[in-house]
Image: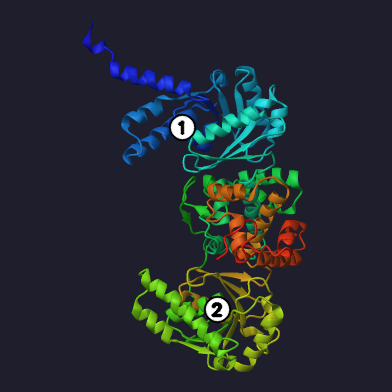
Amino acid sequence: MDPQSTPDLSTVSAEASASAEASALPLSTVAVVGLGTMGTGIAEVLARAGREVIGIDIDEAATRKAVAALEAATARAVRRERLTERERRDVLARFRTFTDLRAAADADLVIEVVPEDYALKRQVFDGLDAVVRPDTLLATGTNALSVTRLAAESQRPERVLGLHFFNPAPAMKLVEVVSSVLTAPTAVAAVTQLARDLGKDPIGLGDRPGFVADGLLFGYLNQAAAMYESRYATREDIDAAMRLGCGLPMGPLALLDLIGVDTARTVLEAMYAESHDRLHAPAPVLGQLAEAGLTGRKAGRGFYTYDAPGSATVVPDAESPAAAGAPVAGRTVTAVGVAGSGTMASGIAEVFAKAGHRVVLAARSLEKAERAKARIGRSMARSVAKGRLTAEVRDAALASITPAGSLDAFADVDLAVEAVAEDLAVKQELFRALDAVCKPGAVLATTTSSLPVIACARVTSRPQDVIGMHFFNPAPAMKLVEVVRTVLTADEVHTTVRAVCAKIRKHPVDCGDRAGFIVNALLFPYLNNAIKMVEQHYASPDDIDAAMKLGGGYPMGPFELLDVVGLDVSLAIEKVLHAEFRDPGLAPSPLLEHLVAAGCLGRKTGRGFREYARR
């Protein structure tokens, strides 16, 4: 025998062992129909988990691109020592591509991830019905279309279900397993176990457009698009507000460009057809951009302009903020007065003191003001202990803070910031006092998060000097300040406050004087819709929180956040939004109202949507 033709017995043995191991796995052979970004990612996850993967796409170029993408991804994994070279070869060997649905004949499971078009998906399912075995499971990757309808029109509806991965599939942990009223429990169990075998966190759901993650996400994205369309705020300020105010990885308009404006519109159309909720009715700008071919990153232009189709690099365009300096000169701000003695007031005073301002911290009594200053001292001590602040800076900042038991101490301040209770009557009384005490030319600012700034301005003799400065809690850590102009606010006051924000190292975003400003106007409808899902018994708080953290990249799930903010505070903000915009979809959930009436206000009372240990 020719030595060169003698097989490597160790290789043969390893390949036979790998083949036997794959065949022993549940749902060991999986076909993926549609080899775009999502389909290719799902194929990679399956192949790396030991499954035999049959990739199918009618476009031969797409199959070649999928193979190249898997080769590149596994090569990176080898460089990062997450795979050995031998494991990489095994993964690549388990992935085969075809251009004909008949290649799925021997699959245990078929996952379709073709574009979100019902007729196209129906065509794929009809083709699969003709070639797969009677026991083969059929999964749709849709995030908007009816799984029930696809199942009902299939030859074996009990084997059809939804399997919704998130992009990029290799990195994102969440998988939504969606069953219709026709789906067999054994099919759900098998696919759920597969998701766990892939290292994913599956949640089981019923069939409704958007399911959990996209059902909440796309309503929020739609509201952001409508806010932009109304010219209430710029695209840059909307995105910065949600990143810095909520800790989100991307702003909503940048995310719409990433998802695809056309895709978002399709999802929202499906959601609106089901819910008839105006919050889901696609903002007209989405249709206008989609019809013009401005579908986001993939087209090189959407809400933003990119340096090339498919690029993530944003380039300046006609809507980019001008680089020129402020057209109006601002006022000099050296001394700052902060009214209040709570957490927000002491946090704001700390921010100004660390930035080198002379600060007067006034409360209803000198004792309360001194306690607030002591709280600042403890906060700064923690910063020193963590190496974020030097002892010298701390000592200088504390020395610059003067506690006072009366607003009379604000006589010489250049900027007065109130951070008292979120009660309009209380704030108006305080602004009357500031008007009487503060020198001419002093800027008067309210930190309200939900009340009309103009209502505070109108009780003074100088409404042109009044503006909103909405800080976020904890003020020393949170970078965002919403700068809220009324129709009477002077340009130089606006310029002054933006300059002050820069000096104290905060990011200002401009918005008009209406309920919720940017952040709360987008955040609280999302939170309210999450509560409605629980109220309707669609999903549990735990599953919804997991979906938004794992599928949406949110730092906290909606119910975690509600319990931290306080259910009473959340209800008050939702009532203000509903009263201002008169949209039925903004009406507070009855479940939230019931919990507040019962005294279940979140962490501060030990019980909200969850129970907490008493301290």
Name the one closer to the observer, 116 or 570. Answer: 570
Farthest residue in the front direction?
614
Q: Residue 162, how many percent across, how many down?
A: 63, 34
In contact (CB < 8 Å): disc 1 and disc 2: no
Q: Earlier in the sequence, mark 1 or mark 2?
A: 1
Q: Quadrant of the N terminus?
A: top left
The correct choice, above or below, for 220 with respect to 263 in the image is below
The correct choice, above or below, for 564 with respect to 379 in the image is above
- In three-dimensional space, the C-alpha distance between marks 1 and 2, rounded to whole angstroms, equals 55 Å
Q: How many marks?
A: 2
| Occupied quadrant, residue 32 | top right
Which residue corresponds to the image point at 43% horizontal and 86% vertical from the top-left? 400
The three-letter code of the residue at mark 1 reads Ala
Name the one closer to the observer, 574 or 239. Answer: 574
Q: Residue 571, how many percent across, how many down?
A: 70, 64
Viewer can see residue 224: yes
* Residue 208, label in figure: none
Secondary structure of the residue carrying numbered label 2 = helix
Residue 222 in the figure: left or right of residue 412: right
Q: Which residue is mark 2?
A: 345
| Occupied quadrant, residue 19 | top left
Residue 253 in the figure: left or right of residue 332: right
Which residue corresponds to the image point at 68% horizontal and 47% vertical from the top-left? 268
Q: Which residue is mark 1?
A: 66
